[in-house]
Amino acid sequence: MTTKQALLPEGWPRPKGYANGVAASGRQVYVAGQVGWTPECVWTSDDFGEQAKLALANVAAVLHAGGARPEHIVRMTWYVTSRREYLAAGRDIGTAFRAIIGHYDIAMTAVEVSALMEDRAKVEIEVTAVVPD
């Protein structure tokens, strides 16, 4: 049984690719920022879309370790080093997102930053998940 609800204020248009807010109850799982490298911390690509795909896969792996699944995500924050590259990789990001996460009823924020802690990182993603009781 799901205990998560996407929030849409009356009269607002439905957003595409995210939710304005999410109400949930259950056990919370917090995933630290994940970058687009392999689980062994090896960089395999400098392509934004590929790094986003790996970062999402890393998010899913940490969720699994915490007894959560992608459908339990209620909040996601993207830190990107280039708004331009993020937007240009939209199709690849969407494909990876649907394959790994599978749903968009997540309160999401994307922020352009001047740099990330890992020099080659172009994207870092952190999430909060709520596993139903």
Image (tube, helix red, strand yellow):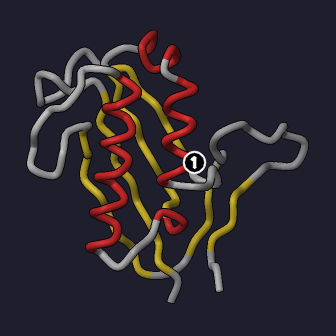
Q: Position of residue 42 (x, y in %)?
A: 10, 38
Q: Residue placed at 44% from the left, 15% from the top?
A: 83
Q: Position of residue 62 (x, y in %)?
A: 27, 63
Q: Say left or right for 62 vs 28.
A: left
Q: Nearer the viewer, residue 117 or 60?
A: 60
Q: Residue placed at 33% from the left, 54% from the top?
A: 59
Q: Residue placed at 40% from the left, 36% from the top?
A: 78
In the rendered image, the vertical position of residue 58 relative to residue 12, given as above or below? below
Residue located farthest toward the right when viewing the structure as drawn: 11
Q: Position of residue 124 (x, y in %)?
A: 29, 36
Residue 4: quarter of image: bottom right
Q: Nearer the viewer, residue 9 or 78?
A: 78
Residue 53: quarter of image: top left
Helix, strand or loop at mark 1:
helix
In the rendered image, the vertical position of residue 110 relative to residue 128, given as above or below? above
> Label 1: which residue?
98
Q: Residue placed at 47% from the left, 78% from the top?
A: 131
In the rendered image, the vertical position of residue 92 relative to residue 29, given as above or below? above
